[in-house]
Amino acid sequence: MIALSFSNILEINSAYRAVWQAPSNIALVKYWGKKALQQPVNASLSMTLSKAASKTSVEVRPSEQRTISFSFEGKQKPEFIPKIDQFFKRIENYCPWINRAAFTIKSENTFPHSAGIASSASSMAALALALTDIDEQLNPGKGDEDFLMKASFLARLASGSASRSVYGGYSVWGLHPEFSRSSDTYAIGYEKIHPVFESFHDDVLITDSQPKAVSSTAGHGLMNNHPFLEGRIAQADKNIRELATALQDGDLNRFIEITENEALTLHGLMMSSEKSFMLIKPTTLAIIKAVRNFRKQSDVPVCFTLDAGPNVHLLYPDKAKEKVQQFIKDELLQYCENQFYLEDITGAGPKKQESYDA
Ligand code: PMV
């Protein structure tokens, strides 16, 4: 594991500010279950998105003790402060200055609130990037790579999936022999990507925009004594190895098999845990069935994945765009809430912003 150079500075003497925009990501090999503090039971691999993102501004002033003001899309949201505070407690050993600073944090999402899309990956990645930026202003580090790893390390302590959102393209979080620099405590970028996967679409079909019934923290917790835990770890280890090869070789068939297997496994694990729960809806299954039929009949390489919810992510290469768009309109929109879906594509990763209002 690489030693990351956090500042360890105890207090700030003047005001600092950083604004970052970070994208969401969709896991292809899923993270589901933790061991130690925010460390995954298996390595996961995700594609970073382009349009679904969060922008966060962090301003700090010297203060006797830590205070936090948080607003989301222009409105004060004190109900989010306990989560931010819990995150700050987890990182105070690395950035002790956060204990003697008054924080003003502002955040917004680029995707509609009503879309039912989890924003913890993008919002926590944007917050971690802004904190890392201020930490580097206090004590300049070893350059770009160190910066992103530090941000990923911090982001993981807020939300595991956020650790993967600091890189563009594809990223891997979790120690795995296939990926030489991989770690359980931060994600790394995965760059061996065939051109067919460089501009890969992810259209999110919104079947239900309600917030999810079971939090991912509770879901991860149910993996602790899951009867299939060992088998799941072995399956994920194999899937990530084979998916990495498929991404490198441009093997769409293998990509489809592994991606769909991972999506259904995630929900299978939820349904088969001791306290069973089900997040998919009849419309989710109707879409899955239609996608598989369409692929069989048309030979268009489109597949689905699922996050911890009922919405369906349709994944396909750029060359299939016209046919898939027609298919969505003809057959899938009927299953979407208000006929609504979001179009997205592989993204280049987070961006530092000059100002919050730009
Ligand atoms: O980052 P968390 O704790 O919200 O967990 C995310 C878990 C999944 O979204 C279901 C899978 C993943 O790897 O992103």
Image (cartoon, rainbow, N blue to C red):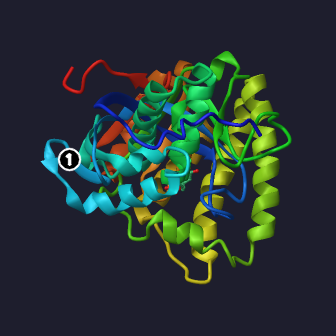
Query: x, y percentage for residue 83?
Result: 37, 60
Q: Nearer the viewer, residue 314 or 323?
A: 314
Query: x, y percentage for residue 324?
Result: 47, 31
Please indicate whether residue 225 sits to the left or right of residue 56 in the image.
Answer: right
User: Crowding near pointer 1: few (<14 within 10 Å), some, many (20+)?
Assistant: some
* Quadrant where the N terminus is found in the figure: top right
Secondary structure of residue under mark 1: strand
User: Residue drawn 37% across and 29% down?
Assistant: 20
Quadrant of residue 112 in the image? top left
Residue type, mark 1 in image: Ser
Compared to residue 145, the image places residue 49 above or below, namely below
Please indicate whether residue 42 sits to the left or right of residue 202 in the image.
Answer: right
Q: Can residue 329 be seen in this view?
A: no
For the residue with label 1, is its CB less than 8 Å from the closest atom of ligand 1? no
Please indicate whether residue 306 sits to the left or right of residue 326 in the image.
Answer: right
Query: x, y percentage for residue 57?
Result: 29, 34
- Residue extending furthest bottom? 274
User: Residue drawn 67% across and 39% down?
Assistant: 172
Please indicate whether residue 186 sits to the left or right of residue 71 in the image.
Answer: right
Q: Can residue 221 be seen in this view?
A: yes
Identify residue for label 1: 71
Q: Nearer the viewer, residue 63 or 299?
A: 63
Query: x, y percentage for residue 173?
Result: 66, 43
Compared to residue 99, the image places residue 354 above or below, namely above
Q: Nearer the viewer, residue 7 or 44?
A: 7
